[in-house]
Amino acid sequence: MYTKAIKKALEFTRPLLIGRLFYKDRQVINDISTMIVLNKNGDILTTARNADIFLTSSEYNETYEKIIKEIDSSPKKAKKIEQKYGIKDDTLIGIHSIIMDIAKDAGKLNIIKHPSLDLAVVSIEKKGNIFVKDFPIFAKKNPEIGTDICGVGFTFPEYKAFEYDNENKRIKVNYNYLNFPIFPTNGIVCRNIADKDEKITMFEMNNQIINGQEGGPIMTRDGKLVGMISGYKVIETNSIPFKIGIAINIETIKDFLDKNNIEYEVEK
């Protein structure tokens, strides 16, 4: 039923690998998220939350590497140092990310975030050697209520790309096991959502959204892009919780890209 949509989405949908390092036992959690490659320049559409990983990781890692080295070099004072910096067992002390299968050498990343929505563009510095050859075709208009849709993204990470480097007190990349199964879900558009300015910028859908799919495309059966997965919200009815998927609609995405001179293709 959604074979065409999924095949089309696989051409330009790529995984973002994320390694998170926690203080207790220096535990490294391998995580995953989703990105959409828009054009031959390698411009990437994703959530602002994903983009924030690129913006903050270097400063974040540098700060905590110094603190961890201080703790490890003075084990008798460890508790005092932990209290000084507010470090607990579940404190995130490091983060690392890898953009998979987009470009041979991306170079510096330029981040453009939407002023109010969970929406961003990541532009790469070196625009040669782009691996992606086919890109999304944008629908002409927002999907109507009841439109049959398919969400595509990466979840259930089955890889071990990151581990703890005890010598340097940081996450390191090992590429031991890489497997990135796409995970599609289907449903319909249920309700439109207005932003604080009462402009329709998002829609709700009844298909299940699973952690990691954020930043992935919402496709029609014939393979047109009508939105980007932002996440989900939980609504309770008679004490029964329901997960409602949330997507940013295509008109909002096009407006954002136009304002920032990002290329994309619209259906004819």
Image: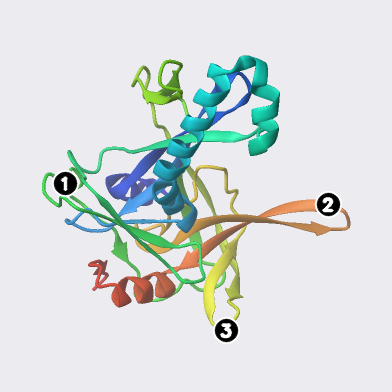
Q: Return the disc, 3 or 2, that comes first in the chain's sequence.
A: 3
The numbered dot on residue 197 is 3
Distance (Cα) linking label 2 and label 1: 47 Å
As drawn, 205 above or below 53:
below
As drawn, 174 above or below 187:
above
Please give left or right for residue 113 compared with residue 123 in the image. right
Taking depth in this image into account, of 134 and 84 the one nearest to the observer is 84
As drawn, 130 above or below 61:
below
As drawn, 143 above or below 66:
below
Q: Are marks 3 and 1 in contact (CB under 8 Å)?
A: no
In percent of width and height, residue 144 lies at: 51, 74
Residue, disc 1: 130
Q: Return the disc, 3 or 1, that comes first in the chain's sequence.
A: 1
Distance (Cα) linking label 3 and label 2: 31 Å
Which of the 4 image quadrants contains residue 238?
A: bottom right
Residue, disc 2: 240
Q: Return the disc, 2 or 1, that comes first in the chain's sequence.
A: 1
